[in-house]
Image (cartoon, grey):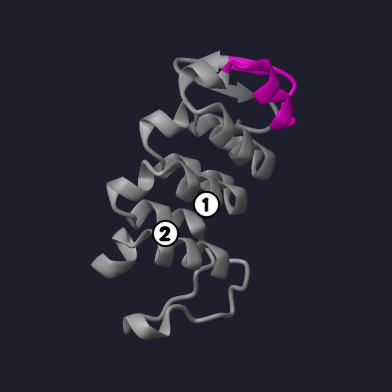
Amino acid sequence: SLSARIRSDRKLFLELVAAADHPSTKWPQDSGEYFEPSRVRFLLRKAAPALQRDKSVVLAAVRRDGHALLYASEDLKDDYDVVHAACSNERRALGHASVRLRNDQSLREAAGLSRFVKHGESVESDSDYE
């Protein structure tokens, strides 16, 4: 598991997200823990709630892995900039956004999704989500 320091240290967390661009890098050596940071969503899922509410941390994560939006705070799932960054990276990330933003036309365009069907609280494309 991630150490408490990694989970709550903003600077170190951002370094881990940046290191995810280089999946062969073992990081961080000084923590005593070794793992391949190939999945940014894993890092955000394990992050302290304060980091999951930090817009710059979440932006950095969703720019590398749009599905990391799943582990952002509810407020950031309703933040246009964060959701746009996630959808630009991974079109299916729109499903992790707030209901309000799932129906935003410009975000649907950013996600490259054309036709939507609403099922409960989720917006789905017939070709991408079935």
Q: Is residue 107 above or below residue 71?
A: above
Q: Quadrant of the N terminus?
A: bottom left
Where is residue 16? Give x, y as percent.
48, 67
Q: Amino acid at mark 2?
A: Leu
Q: Is residue 1 visible?
A: no
Q: Residue at x 54, y 67 (%)?
A: 38
Residue position marked by numbered label 2 in the rendering: 43
Residue position marked by numbered label 1 in the rendering: 61
Where is residue 97? Give x, y as percent.
50, 29
SS under mark 2: helix
Q: Is residue 123 above or below residue 62?
A: above
Distance, label 1 to label 2, CA atoms, is: 8 Å
Where is residue 28? Give x, y as percent.
43, 79
Q: Is residue 10 above or below residue 3?
A: above
Residue range in magenta is: 103-117
SS under mark 1: helix
- Taking the magenta stretch, the answer to whether it contains residue 113 is yes
